[in-house]
Image (cartoon, rainbow, N blue to C red):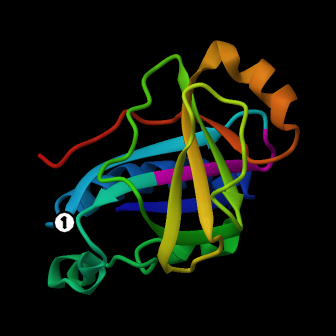
């Protein structure tokens, strides 16, 4: 399963403190049994800044686990930044066991849809994920990893649909 958190961060004065906090939070999450990987992304050419975090989780049961609850999962650890969020959504998706590897020089495209039948002009074909838990702000999300050099052409093909994200952190694994 893939857990995704979408943020639009609207306060430039506190954004660097938020990133510093988030770096430590990623390590805390990865110490919880059931979390297998984590990576953060920043939307390309969007203001206010939009971010996506993707985590591989073994099952939805991780959110009820003592490890997750005791480390303050679910937003309580980031409460001091909530007023700076223009958007904060948490979705759990089935359809993949791990987050896709997005290396330097690559980006990830994400598109929310009511149907997984939507055709997208990408090679490789997008991975369609079904929303199964948490906020469920979409029924489906398509993700595809592209070379950064293909973003301009891809943007012209899809217009304003979806978001293109560059890796903000490397993909992390539990220690």
Q: Nearer the viewer, residue 108 or 142?
A: 142
Q: Is residue 30 magenta?
A: no
Q: Residue at x 73, y 31 (%)?
A: 121
Q: Is residue 24 above or below residue 64?
A: above
The boundaries of the magenta stretch are 46-53
Q: Is residue 112 above or below residue 144?
A: below
Q: Residue at x 49, y 60 (%)?
A: 4
Q: Nearer the viewer, residue 38 or 84?
A: 38
Residue 104 x/y as whole percent: 46, 20
> What secondary structure is the stretch in magenta mostly built from?
strand
Q: Quadrant of residue 39?
A: top left
Label 1 crowd bin: few (<14), some (14–19), many (20+), radius 10 Å:
many
Residue 67 x/y as whole percent: 17, 77
Q: Is residue 52 left or right of residue 45?
A: left
Q: Nearer the viewer, residue 153 or 35?
A: 153
Tell which residue pokes out farthest to the top in this image: 149
Q: Is residue 107 left or right of residue 43?
A: left
Q: Report the residue marked by disc 1.
A: 34
Residue 61 x/y as whole percent: 24, 81
The N terminus: image quadrant:
bottom left
Q: Is residue 147 left or right of residue 73?
A: right
Q: Residue at x 60, y 25 (%)?
A: 123
Residue 63 x/y as whole percent: 30, 80
Label 1 sits on a secondary structure element that is loop
The mark total stands at 1
Q: Is residue 50 left or right of residue 77?
A: right
Q: Quadrant of residue 26?
A: bottom left
């Amino acid at each position: 399963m893939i857990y995704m958190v979408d943020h639009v961060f609207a306060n430039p004065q506190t954004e660097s403190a938020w990133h510093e906090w988030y770096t430590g939070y990623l390590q805390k999450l990865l110490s919880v049994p059931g979390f297998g990987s984590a990576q953060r992304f920043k939307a390309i050419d969007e203001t206010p800044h939009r971010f996506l975090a993707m985590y591989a989780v073994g099952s939805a049961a991780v959110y009820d686990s003592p490890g997750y609850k005791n480390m303050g999962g679910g937003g309580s650890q980031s409460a001091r930044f909530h007023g700076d969020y223009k958007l904060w959504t948490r979705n759990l998706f089935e359809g993949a066991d791990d987050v896709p590897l997005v290396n330097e020089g690559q980006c990830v495209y994400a598109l929310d849809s009511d149907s997984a039948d939507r055709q997208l002009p990408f090679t490789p074909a997008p991975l369609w994920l079904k929303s199964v838990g948490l906020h469920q702000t979409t029924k489906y999300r398509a993700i595809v990893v592209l070379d950064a050099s293909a973003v301009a052409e891809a943007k012209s093909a899809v217009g304003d649909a979806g978001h293109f994200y560059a890796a903000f952190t490397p993909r992390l694994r539990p220690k």
